[in-house]
Amino acid sequence: PDYADENEALLARSIAGYTPGERHLIQVNGIDALLVSGSFSLGDMTIRNIRIFMFTQGELFVISALALTDRWEAYHDDFEISLYSFRR
């Protein structure tokens, strides 16, 4: 959670208008993970992102995906398959 908190703070400082989204604990193939999402504007586009932070066997893994907000639902299933198929 500390790394995810710092990552969120960095995004908020680096990207004007960054808005945090959902944040909750999940499991990815038996590994505890933290799912964090957010959104931001880039010109006239709004971008949505999702990140999963996992710490296992002494290593931190961060998996992320992003898409235009108006296309998010079209890619949602592909994101879920990719994000939840992590193998160590």
Image (cartoon, rainbow, N blue to C red):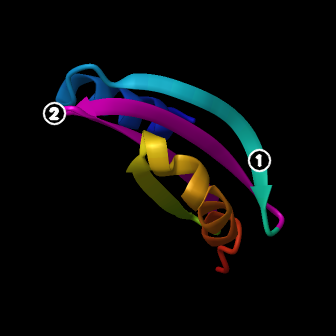
Q: Which residue is mark 2?
A: 43
Residue type at mark 1? Ile
Mark 2 falls on what kind of element? loop
Residue 48 lies in what quarter of the image? top left
Residue sticking out furthest to the right: 30
Residue in front for this viewpoint, 39 or 27: 39
Q: Nearer the viewer, mark 1 or mark 2?
A: 2
Q: Position of residue 77 (x, y in %)?
A: 68, 62
Q: Earlier in the sequence, mark 1 or mark 2?
A: 1
Splitting the image into 4 quarters, where does residue 83 fall? bottom right
> In the image, is residue 82 above or below residue 42?
below
Coordinates of residue 14 in the picture (x, y in percent):
19, 30
**Quarter placement of the C terminus:** bottom right
Q: Are marks 1 and 2 in contact (CB under 8 Å)?
A: no
Would you call the spot at circle 1 few (<14 residues within 10 Å), some (14-19), or many (20 or more)?
some
Q: Residue at x 45, y 40 (%)?
A: 69
Q: Secondary structure at mark 1?
A: strand
Examine the rendered structure and indicate whether residue 69 appears above or below residue 10: below
The N terminus, quarter of image:
top right
Indicate yes or no whether the magenta region holds residue 32.
yes
Per the image, the residue denoted by label 1 is: 26
Residue 49 shows up from this direction: no
- Which percent across, then down, holds residue 72? 52, 49
| Magenta range | 30-56
